[in-house]
Amino acid sequence: MKITRISPPQAYPLRHAVLRPHQSLEACKYPADFEKDSFHLGAFIGESLISVASFYQEDHPKIVGTPLFRLRGMATLPDYRNQGAGAALIREAEKILEARDASGWWCNARTTVSQYYEKMGMEAVGEVFEIVPIGPHRLMKKAVAR
């Protein structure tokens, strides 16, 4: 498995297939995709992109520290889950975040995967909330190791 930076458009088909299959491809394009501080990572097996994660510099009012980065659009093809692709993406992202002197990162995790993020050292903040039309989520955070 190879982890590398990818362009936002490379992430769109996987985001669509895994995260938003009942929405348009346009719903998988995030406003900050092309911001200068944003970065996108992909996990490849051979030439096949099997997992993606995008990070955006974005503070959160419930999380202390600056700068913070937000994880969005993390998705792994179903046939490749539980093989370490997501964890490998996070490890690489944390190296990048450390090099950028980020204080931490956060995400709005679907409740169905919040335990996955807890295994990676994240902690939940506040109560479960709804993102329409996607479903229930938890705000989760993690400090960047120094």
Image (spheres, helix red, strand yellow):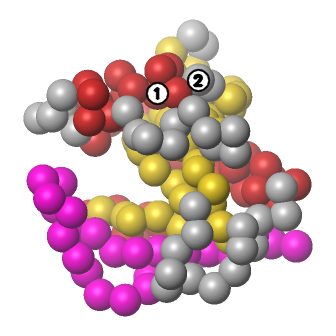
Q: Quadrant of residue 26?
A: top left
Please provide the residue range marked out in magenta: 124-146
- Separation of residues labelled 1 and 2 (CA atoms): 7 Å
Residue drawn at x 46%, y 50% as measured from the top left: 72
Closer to us: 19 or 1: 19
Q: Quadrant of the N terminus?
A: top right
Going 34% across and 74% down the picture, which residue do you hit? Answer: 138
* The C terminus: image quadrant: bottom right
Give the secondary structure at mark 1: helix
Q: Position of residue 96 (x, y in %)?
A: 79, 49
Residue 34 position within the rendered picture, expressed as x and y whole percent measured from the top left? 57, 33
The answer to whether 98 is drawn above or below residue 79 in the figure is below
Task: Name the spot of residue 55 as percent of width and height, x first.
Answer: 59, 49
Say few, some or many: other residues with alpha carbon within 10 Å of mark 2 (under 14 / 14 to 19 / 20 or more): some
Q: Is residue 85 visible?
A: no
Mark 2 is on which residue type?
Ser
Examine the rendered structure and indicate whether residue 138 appears above or below residue 20.
below
Query: SS for tag 2?
Result: loop
Task: Give the answer, above or below, for where 12 lies relative to 143.
Answer: above
Is mark 1 in CB contact (under 8 Å) with mark 2?
yes
The residue at which mark 1 appears reads as 11
Q: Position of residue 23 (x, y in %)?
A: 15, 34
Q: Is residue 117 visible?
A: yes
Give the residue displayed 72% in from the left and 74% down from the top: 66
Looking at the image, the residue that sits furthest to the bottom is 126
Q: Is residue 44 positioned above or below 126 on the image?
A: above
Residue placed most toward the observer, 90 or 24: 24
Q: Is residue 109 left or right of residue 83?
A: left
Mark 2 highlights which residue?
7
Given the image, on which type of amino acid does mark 1 rest? Ala
